[in-house]
Amino acid sequence: MIGARTAGWKAWMLGLFLLTLTLGVRLWPAWNLKAEVADLSLYRAMAQVVLKGDNIYQRRVFFPYTPYSQFLPASMLKLSDYMGWRFDFTMKLPAIVADGIVSVLLCWALLAAGASLGWTLAWGLSWALNPVSILISAFHGNVMPVLACLLLGAVIAAERAESSVHRRRLLAISALVLGLGIAMRTFPVLALPIFLALAARSIRETLEFGVLAGFAAGISSLPYLIFARQTFVREILSYSGFSDFGWVAALRAMSYLTGGPLLSGFDDGLIMMTKSLFLYAYGIVLLTLPWFRRTSLALGSMLAPLLFFGLYGGLSAQYLVWMIPLAILVRDRFVLVFSVLAAICMACFYALYHPGILFGVYPPLFRGNVLISAIYALTNLIMVALSLAWTVRIVLREIWGSKGGAQSLWLLPLWPRWRWLRWLYAIGICALLAMWGGMLHADLAWASNTFVRIAPRGLHGAWTNLADFLSKSQSMR
């Protein structure tokens, strides 16, 4: 009894320590940067529109999201006025609080899964001190960590439902939490098929989960569909993101290295092609779900963000934090490498394009230059390769671990008995992969032509520019 109480006390103290550390290392820079730049200035404009009672979807490419999150900037602007705090600080609070909740959830889930206090502390620190999370929440100020928190909560609730007598209640909580994320941004809907395949056990549970997950987005979108359908649909469907990260961003950085402009544009058709490439690849990955174990919900939920980063061309910095809590939950050490690379890449991106995010009102410690651009391009390409390799690793481990039988999908009860069905299914996936390979070849050809067009001096010029810059830097010393 005394041993159990001591262990419980230590667990509480560990959770409190991780929570305090998580909040502390984010609140300090959030308060001291004192710069309302990039997304923060956009959030102020959104807040003003909402507080006036105007239609936030009226302005083009201003708020291309599902409705719920429009109230976050408005409430933070009111908090700023009430407390006398700067808006750039209050707007970062939702993300920082979400990061704190993630720390508590991870601590509890890891201990519940049987991890020792030492390993729980180690993995908890990998989130509390995670440079990607700190950069997004405390420096950038984007609200994406709120969605990462909701996705983690949905996964943990669904996993707990597997062994709980309150299964139906926990599944409902999981669906509602995931649905809240979908009501704030559309991309969490990509995780819904994973939940339906790995968390549900019957047609009834699948239908209930799907309805609850779509409820918040549906009910909040209904007024706009009735009274402002044209502007609402236009904005929701028109946004394709910015090419800040990923392999397309590496092309842009290479253009600068070869003597081109710092910020070069791309044909919209290239971004649309990468969207098709990503969606097609994700569809193929979803077809491998029959081999996934029911205990692999967190791993399955990582597939969409990993493929998203590896293939899509319209990526912004905030998407890098999406799957990090899930990777820590499953204790995958790839996340440590990914976090370091992503943090370096983000620092280079901010130095090149948004130094106010990184340094606030203070003089920059370093400025964007040819060397920073080269590091930015290289880390982008390494992260793309890592994301795709990570995806393949997850899928192949699940397939090899299943020993040929269906592990999860209740829709395939004949899978273990009908061997020809497994072979036919596998052949179909291979055929789809071949078709996807053709799409990939077309995308790479287009990207190659784009690079030739925007890069005045080619790859040799990039190497020459970098060598000249390093030589000048050495001589100045």
Image (tube, grey):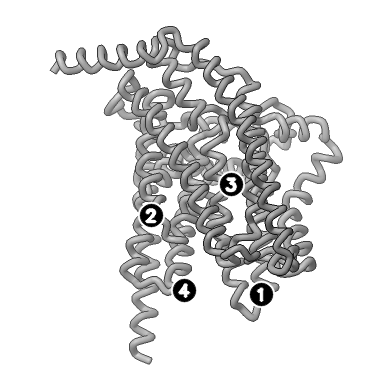
Residue 73: quarter of image: top right
Q: Nearer the viewer, mark 3 or mark 1?
A: 3
Q: Earlier in the sequence, mark 4 or mark 2?
A: 4
Residue 167: mark = 1
> How far is disc 3 from disc 1 in space, using C-alphas?
26 Å
Q: Nearer the viewer, mark 1 or mark 2?
A: 2
Q: Earlier in the sequence, mark 3 or mark 1?
A: 1
Q: Quadrant of the N terminus?
A: bottom left
Point out the residue furthest to the top here. 456
Q: Residues within 10 Å of mark 3 (few under 14, many from 20)?
A: many
Q: Looking at the image, which residue is at 53% across and 30% down?
A: 41
Residue 112: mark = 4
Residue 456: quarter of image: top left
Q: Nearer the viewer, mark 4 or mark 3?
A: 3
- Mark 3: amino acid: Ala
- The spot of residue 342 in percent (x, y) is 40, 39
- The spot of residue 441 in percent (x, y) is 59, 27
Q: Earlier in the sequence, mark 1 or mark 4?
A: 4
Residue at label 2? 333
Judging from the image, what secondary structure is the residue with disc 2 in?
loop
- Mark 1: amino acid: Arg
